[in-house]
Image (cartoon, helix red, strand yellow):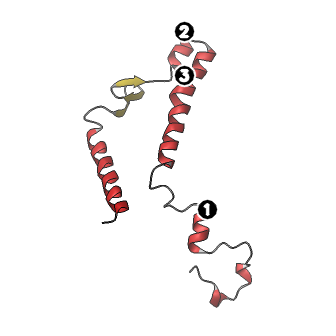
């Protein structure tokens, strides 16, 4: 096995173990009766109930949304984009390079049908 394949198997196995043990250790779940996420056993809410009840003002609510929604989403996106599996998929430029069907300098429709191929 190459080092890349070894690392890939390790990451896949780690994710599977996390997937199996997450409900047991209450790492992340959505509680339907309470209507919010439970992260590491603690309720994770936006504080919308406090805002509607008038206990916090608009600035505190904006800070809640920033810290409890936007920052975690950006952190997750940064983590995923830095992972080794990103870039393997098919992006717009990646498909164009991989399949060579998109060439701005060549008119694909004008070529004879026998020479139209994706390889």
> In the visual, does 100 lie left or right of 13?
right
Q: Which mark is residue 27?
A: none
**Residue drawn at 48 percent across, 61 percent down:** 88
If you read the primary sequence from the N terminus, does the residue marked by circle 2 or circle 3 appear first?
A: 2
Residue 76 in the image, given as x and y percentages of width and height: 48, 40
Q: Residue at x 53, y 26 (%)?
A: 67
Asked where in the image residue 113 lies, by quadrant, the reply is bottom right
Do residues under tags 1 and 2 come within 8 Å of each other at their CB atoms? no
Question: Residues at badges 3 and 1 in contact (C-beta under 8 Å)?
Answer: no
Marks 1 and 2, how far apart in space? 48 Å
Residue at 74% across, 75% down: 105
Image location of residue 72, percent across then percent down: 50, 34
Q: CA distance from mark 2 to mark 3?
A: 13 Å
In the foreground, 45 or 59: 59
| Residue 108 image position (x, y, % from top left) | 70, 79
**Disc 3 crowd, CA 10 A, few/some/many (<14, 14-19, 20+):** some
Q: Which residue is mark 3?
A: 64
Foreground tag (2 vs 3):
3
What is the number of callouts on the image?
3
Give the secondary structure at mark 1: helix
Q: Is residue 54 left or right of residue 34?
A: right
| Secondary element at tag 3 | helix
Q: State the residue lying farthest toward the top.
A: 55
Q: Which mark is residue 55?
A: 2
Q: Is residue 57 left or right of residue 16?
A: right
In which quarter of the view is residue 53 placed? top right
Please give the residue where the numbered disc 1 appears in the rendered image.
92
Quarter the N terminus occupies: bottom left
In-front residue for pair 96/54: 96
Eyeballing the image, is 15 above or below 105? above
Q: Residues within 10 Å of mark 2 (few under 14, many from 20)?
A: few
Quarter holding the C terminus? bottom right
């Amino acid at each position: 096995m190459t080092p890349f394949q070894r690392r890939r198997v390790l990451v896949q196995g780690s994710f599977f173990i996390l997937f199996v043990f997450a409900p047991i250790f209450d790492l992340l779940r959505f509680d339907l009766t309470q209507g919010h996420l439970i992260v590491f056993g603690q309720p994770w809410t936006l504080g919308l109930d406090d805002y509607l009840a008038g206990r916090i003002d608009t600035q505190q609510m904006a800070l809640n949304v920033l810290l409890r929604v936007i920052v975690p989403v950006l952190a997750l996106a940064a983590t995923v984009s830095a992972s080794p599996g990103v870039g393997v998929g098919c992006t717009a430029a990646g498909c164009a390079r991989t399949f060579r069907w998109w060439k701005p300098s060549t008119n694909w429709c004008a070529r004879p049908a026998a020479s139209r191929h994706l390889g």
